[in-house]
Image: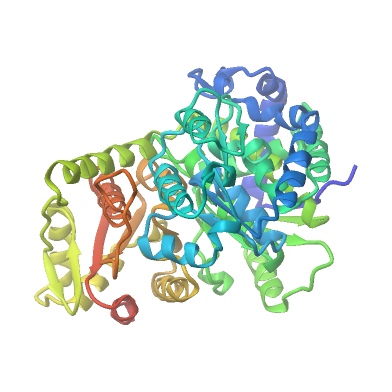
Amino acid sequence: MSINPVSYSLPPTIEDAVKRQIAAWESDNKIHRIWEKDASVWTGDDESRWLGWLTIVEEEIGETQKYKDFHSNIEQARFTDVLLMGMGGSSLCPEVLAVTFGKKNFHILDSTVPAQVRAVEEKLDLSKTLFIVASKSGSTLEPNCFKQYFFDRVSKISDEPGKQFVAITDPGSKMEQIAKDDGFRHIFYGKPEIGGRFSALSAFGLTAAAAMGLDIDILLSRAADMAELCKRHNPQENPGALLGLVLGVCHTLGRDKLTICASPEVHDLGAWLEQLIAESTGKHGVAIIPVDREPMIDAENYYGDRVFVSLGLKGSPTDEKVYTRLEDIERAGHPMIRIELESLYHISQEFFRWEFATAVAGSVMGINPFNQPDVESAKIEAKKITEEYERTGSLPDERPFFEAGGIALFADDANVNELDAAAGDERSLDSYVKAHISRLGPNDYFALLAYIEMNPENEGALQSIREKVLNKELSATCLGFGPRFLHSTGQAYKGGANNGVFLQITSDDASDLPVPGQKFTFGVVKAAQARGDFQVLLDRGRRALRMHITGNIDDGLNKIKEAIA
């Protein structure tokens, strides 16, 4: 048995608290109760309905032939590219596998931004592309729009467009019926007892892995080794339980920002961890906020609200600057978790370890880690806006409280009053941006929420903005592209503690794309999602500002960056 090694460096106060939790969990037999699907480990609500992920590895080991047959089938068809279309748990694990294993011909679409849909399409030869529609419920807006768009495109060049489509969905879903009606090449079924963010080792991750040509037997055998260890009743011998207790205890002691430092070989694992942790723990006024891809600063400048996890690959080159900084952070007394993957295929062990750990941390935090009430609230608000568009042919009117230089600012009265007071007599873009950033306190975090195309140029500009805020305020910073973060960290931003300061960035679309069969376009969907997201933040009393770029995006992002300096 080859297991990814882990080490912990904890300050005495946290170490003592973890020891007490270990004793309590062993005394209460909680690990056994998790495997027995005892909901009282958490809140006694419906948790027992959502524990199918505990045994999915064992079940899938007996089903690997279907994935091998699938890979052989699509190889024989000579597809040159694969496009997986989904959101959140349906797309993040496939993305991590594709990036980690360097599968350049496996693409992900999880954005309704028209420019991003177009950019993905331009990479493909539509006649030689396999399209995978991944949606557990089959009713999620985005994958349905993606399917309609590309099915319409393929229908124009093929008499049998369904032969280029595969569905991953739960039995009895709307997507299952669509797939059957449209003659899809194949339907893979998820397990209704597994929520999306816990589905990495189910059909949602394995179908994608098979399409990439990964060895399913190795992935599952590595995961099975971790699952077996996570059955041990003593938390000290259980890698998932121990990690979960550390995270849960750190949260109770005010260290609620999990800062992920991943080496280049496994850097995308952070995107999957963001959803798993934030969506699972962010509710009822508590949250563990995952902080991924944040620039590093000197150890003495971090506040005492951080937990650090270092993820690396055995045998990979060491970045001396990063190594030294992590050592400094550890010596400064911050909790440090170090995990080293034995090989890239050992990434499946981390899927299971972190799923188990998240469930355990949720118990320590006194929450149900398997629901996501505030994700639904944002969907409801977005649906209201799209329905109004369908009725009237236009989006609801909105008026900025300030506009200059191709950027319009939006907020509710409470936020505007606070911003006016902080800005003083000066009314300018610079003064409002500075006023908004100044609302950060020592244990707050800053979240940059961008509904623009996710490309290297935009990401670089946003990371630069993020770094300026970090260096100026020393608060933890997060960066998410919409609408993908709505199915990920968005739950924690709305349902967690009110210690976030949010800057939403939206923009006009240079051109739009229709959604076949609908009155609305991708641009309308994106706008509705952004407005719905922002409205729920305001409804939750969050410190939130929306900046809408009406001109050139590059110019607008530069103005925001300059305003922070």
Question: 330 above or below 235?
Answer: below
* Quarter occupied by residue 82: bottom right
Identify the residue at image location x=65%, y=36%: 203
Q: Which quadrant would the C terminus be assigned to in this image?
A: bottom left
The residue nearer to you, when weighing 273 against 424, is 273
Q: Is residue 308 visible?
A: no
Decide if residue 137 is on the left or right side of residue 329: left
Decide if residue 83 is on the left or right side of residue 144: right
Q: Which quadrant would the N terminus be assigned to in this image?
A: top right
Residue 198 location in percent, x, y? Answer: 60, 37
Q: Is residue 60 visible?
A: yes
* Quarter occupied by residue 30: top right
Colour scheme in the image? rainbow
Question: 294 above or below 139?
Answer: below
Identify the residue at image location x=54%, y=35%: 183
The residue nearer to you, when weighing 140 against 328, is 140
Decide if residue 89 is on the left or right side of residue 338: left
Residue 209 location in percent, x, y? Answer: 70, 48
